Image (cartoon, helix red, strand yellow):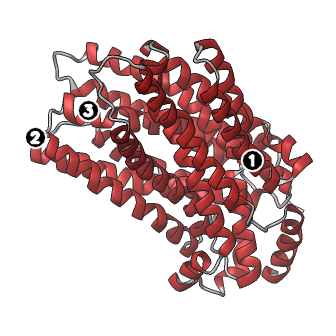
Amino acid sequence: MKKINTSIKRFWGTSELGFSFMATMETSFFILFLTDVARLPLAMVAVITGFSGIADAVTAVLAGAIIDKTTFKNGKYRPWLIYCPPVVVIFFILMFTKIGTNLSAAIICSIGYIVSHGVWNIAWTANRAMIGSLSDDAKERAFLSGRIAAGSSGGKIIASYLVPVLTTAFLGLFMGAGESWGYTITAAIASLVFLVTYFVHYQITKGYDRPEEYAGISKKSVTLMDMLKAIVTNPQLLILLVADALRLIGFYMIAACAAYYTKIVLENPSATSIILVIFNAGTLVGSLMSKQIVAKLGTKKASILGTGGLAVFLILLYFLPSSQALVFIILFVAQTIFGVAYGLTTSMYSMCGTDSEYRTGKDTKGIIMACSSLAIKIAIALRGIVISAALAAIAYDPDASVTAAAQGGIKLVFLIIPAVFSIVSVVMFLLYRIKDSDIEKMEQEIAKRRA
């Protein structure tokens, strides 16, 4: 039986601190950089973000295919953790540059976005897919998955404060040489943190993901058709993909609508940063509890209760008085409960990967783990559509005075709609059939076949 070592127990999840730090800079400042610093025309910005977003979703799936088709002399997943980050550093920096004319700057920024995201999608997917090579124990996989989610939440908390501080400091330092330099240097720091933290994961996993583990696989080449079948003929993976995307729509809606809620309902816009910290801190705490909860309930029940618990507390918050302190407390509790389920995400996709190889004899964990990234990108895209439609439906006007009707409408968008998505997600999770007790047996049988 494969077991994780002490270094992994202590430092696993460090990679996500770096990744989230870098990714938060992109999600929070890239569009602002294009419009206010690079001063590109809005139509050009729309083309850059739209085209790059589509390319990002496509490369998320291709990342899994590349990983499944590739085995290095020193492993299958682990090598990507040192091969990809240096490339990401170079092209992430290019995202935040203003070189030449508007057209040349737009092209360079677009290339930087597409290449950096395409390469980091490979590293991100390999990092998660490697969980199956570290342990075949369901509780340890839950621990590893929880640490990934905890690191992600921790990175967002740090970046929420540190990125604006760094950007402001460098903007002041390089104001005479060009405003874009402040963002360029901050991007360099953020991407270098990503490189260092992924190197930490590479180091602590030394001795795992050995080439001999895949000796039996190399004789059975995984084709693109095998990868496609691994998705479309895997009902458990499809159920998980839909359920995950649904709850993530609600998750990202809460984060995106926090500013509307504090402005209209709490009538205190300055509370936005506090809510976001509480939101991510609750998710962090819940993620760290995933292993203990799984030991008592199992992965499926823990995911259902965590996702359903979020819905219950959001609905409760809708009917309670909009006291700022009460909102902070209940939102923290809601996100802590959800954090347990959120922390099991990687573990559940890993289970689907094991189940697929057990049934088909083909190792397609890369493409299956890429579905986790795909769920995130689908959720973010649909979240934007849902928020825009909901704000239009309640006739939201940023310049209008605060009324009871406006407050009721924003409470629906911030609380009830995310709760509905969570409830539908729970219904989908009820259809998920892979049991924790089956995974160890599957892994043992797979090891025999490889031998």
Q: Going 75% across and 73% down the picture, which residue do you hit?
A: 355
Q: Can you give x and y, in whole percent of width and height, for residue 24 in the image?
A: 45, 35
| Amino acid at circle 1 | Leu
Query: Rounded to the nearest whole Å, what is the CA distance between mark 3 and mark 1?
Result: 35 Å
Label 1 neighbour load within 10 Å: few <14, some 14-19, many 20+: many
Foreground: disc 3 or disc 2: 3
Q: Is residue 373 visible?
A: yes
Mark 1: which secondary structure?
helix
* Badge number at residue 255: none
Foreground: disc 2 or disc 1: 1
Q: Going 85% across and 80% down the picture, which residue do you hit?
A: 448
* Badge number at residue 144: 1
Using the image, determine if residue 434 lies above or below residue 421.
below
Q: Which residue is mark 3?
A: 33
- Mark closer to the chain start, 2 or 1: 2
Q: Going 71% across and 41% down the picture, which residue do you hit?
A: 147
Query: Rounded to the nearest whole Å, what is the CA distance between mark 3 and mark 2?
Result: 16 Å
| Amino acid at circle 2 | Gly
Q: Which residue is mark 2?
A: 100
Do residues under tags 3 and 2 come within 8 Å of each other at their CB atoms? no
Q: Is residue 284 visible?
A: no
Mark 3: which secondary structure?
helix
